[in-house]
Amino acid sequence: MRRPRFIAAQARHAKGPLGRLIASIMARETWAENQRAIEALGINEGDRILDVGCGHGRSLAVLAARAPKGRVTGVDPSALMVDIAVRRNRDLVKARRVTVAMAEVDALPFPDSSIDKALCVHVLYFWDSLDAGLREIARVLKPGGRLALVFRSAADERAVAAFPKDIYRFPTETAVTSALEAAGFIIDRSESCDEPRPQGPALVTATRCG
Ligand SMILES: C[S@@+](CC[C@H](N)C(=O)[O-])C[C@H]1O[C@@H](n2cnc3c(N)ncnc32)[C@H](O)[C@@H]1O
């Protein structure tokens, strides 16, 4: 079914009461794929973890439970999403186990080599530049740090037909793996999140070179 433009625009940058409704639907719709990304990261108890485009922040509590001696941060450019993610995780935020910051992928507010694991689920369609976004994630990851990316690719004909092209830019899987390699990653795994439907969302896991 074709997604109306105003709904797609809210997925890119949620605001107002409609944005709040979309955030709660999104938290259910993307949950299985977030769980796949979290599993793929192989989280250790002391990891410092970053969720790029965390949206509603549903992943953050699970990440904090997987890394009880670590630290979890979500970033998102939507003030509404940051507010929802902070409220959803208020106890963990109070305990300083979870932080949520307003930021875009191309200017992450973290020092070089400070993050062990990063995930980014259904976000890269909205980036100004795939290359710049992946370079910035590589900058903040420690050498040996791991990234899990989930996205629908240009091969997913249903998605390409359903979402407005000027809002959702679906890359080919090859474009993503090439950009990851150019940014200094080694590809660990590239698979469909939705077996046996190979055209379902792709999960690509990559390690930042040492
Ligand atoms: C489709 S939602 C996905 C949210 C969440 N990751 C999930 O799996 O449900 C896309 C999210 O990416 C955020 N976003 C859009 N442009 C971004 C950018 N340039 N950098 C980081 N996040 C961005 C949006 O605000 C939104 O919260």
Image (cartoon, grey):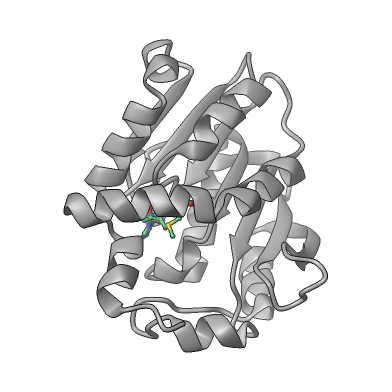
The x, y position of residue 30, in whole percent, is 54, 54
Note whether 98 is above or below 6 in the view shown: above
**Residue 24 visible:** yes
Q: Is residue 140 left or right of residue 164?
A: right
Q: Where on the picture, by quarter, is residue 174?
A: bottom right
- Residue at 54% across / 59% down in the picture? 134
Note whether 75 is above or below 171 in the view shown: above
Quadrant of the frame with the C terminus = top right
Viewer-nearest residue: 183 or 14: 14
The x, y position of residue 88, in whole percent, is 38, 29
Note whether 131 is above or below 159 in the view shown: above
Q: How many marks?
A: 0
Q: Is residue 7 left or right of residue 62?
A: left
**Residue 112 visible:** no
The x, y position of residue 185, in whole percent, is 69, 57
* Residue ranking furthest to the left: 16
Q: Where on the picture, by quarter, is residue 168?
A: bottom left
* Residue ranking furthest to the top: 95
- Residue at 52% across / 79% down in the picture? 170
The x, y position of residue 34, in whole percent, is 61, 48
- Residue at 38% across / 78% down in the picture? 3
Ligand 1's quadrant is bottom left
Note whether 98 is above or below 140 in the view shown: above
- Residue at 63% across / 16% down in the picture? 68
Q: Is residue 166 left or right of residue 181?
A: left
Viewer-nearest residue: 31 or 167: 31
Q: Is residue 13 left or right of residue 191?
A: left
